[in-house]
Amino acid sequence: MSKFTTKRILYYFLRGLVILVPIALTVYIIVVTLAWIDSLIPVNFPGLGLIIISGIIIGIGYLASSFIAKPVFELMEDLIMSVPFIGMIYSSIKDLLTAFVGDKKKFNQPVLVEMDPGSNLYKMGFLTQEDMNIVGQPDMVAVYLPHSYNFSGNFYILPKERVTLLALPSADVMKFVVSGGVSGYEELQLAEETARNQAAQHETEQLQQPKVSRIAIDG
């Protein structure tokens, strides 16, 4: 077998590996999770556990949003928050989930941060607070910088002039940052092109609008 053929076979093998491994891991995690949920239910009906758990979550969400049951959930939350250490863990997890999917989302404004003035070193992140008067820094803003390939990140308080707002979808920016720039780039390109085209179309429409002449009447 020639060296060229061996290299091509190795290339195809690695390419297939890159495609199959993420799919296999995703399927494996889903299957294991569903099997674990089904094991909690004594009835032998595949998928029943997922349906029941989803129904319970939806039901709790509905009750927590209702006018009658909302005070009860708030009381339970206050009791949990009053327990040392457990309250801290609970509040941290809740705040993180609320930042992503709650009514008051925090990670909805992507930004580009210059790490040091004149360094040409930038990081992408999310603006979480625009007012830092609480720590005596009125000219500062709070920025969250996620780690690549991880669900942790760094938190910085920076001068406003060192933060650039990005007119890009937050979900695509998060995907781009968390993946270390490996994935999400095409989506960001498409979003930028779409925004540019919309701006150009809006400008064209403004130019095409008929101009109304104003006649000055001297009194």
Image (cartoon, rainbow, N blue to C red):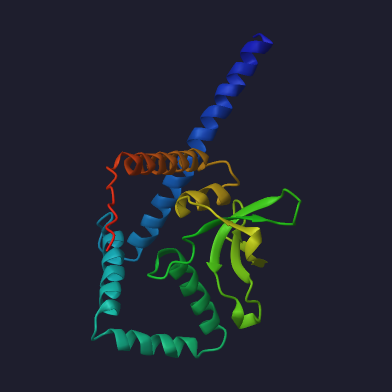
Residue 112 in percent (x, y) is at 60, 54
Quadrant in which the C terminus is drawn: bottom left
Q: Tell me the quarter of the picture where residue 13 sits.
A: top right
User: What residue sits 66% from the left and 81% below the top?
Assistant: 136
**In the figure, is residue 106 to the left or right of 213?**
right
User: Looking at the picture, does residue 194 appear above or below residue 66?
Assistant: above
User: What residue sits 49% from the left and 43% below the top?
Assistant: 188
User: Looking at the picture, does residue 168 appear above or below residue 90?
Assistant: above
- Can the viewer see residue 42? no
User: What residue sits 40% from the left and 51% below the top?
Assistant: 30
User: What residue sits 48% from the left and 45% below the top?
Assistant: 25
**In the figure, is residue 159 to the left or right of 12?**
right
- Can the viewer see residue 120? yes
Residue 31 in percent (x, y) is at 39, 50
Q: Tell me the quarter of the picture where residue 43 sits.
A: bottom left
Residue 34 in percent (x, y) is at 36, 56
Q: Which of 124 and 23 is in front in this view?
A: 124
Quadrant in which the N terminus is drawn: top right
Q: Which of 191 and 14 is in front in this view?
A: 191
**In the figure, is residue 168 to the left or right of 103?**
right
Q: Nearer the viewer, residue 65 or 80?
A: 65
Residue 74 in percent (x, y) is at 36, 86
Residue extending farthest to the top is 2
Q: Tell me the quarter of the picture where residue 63 sits.
A: bottom left
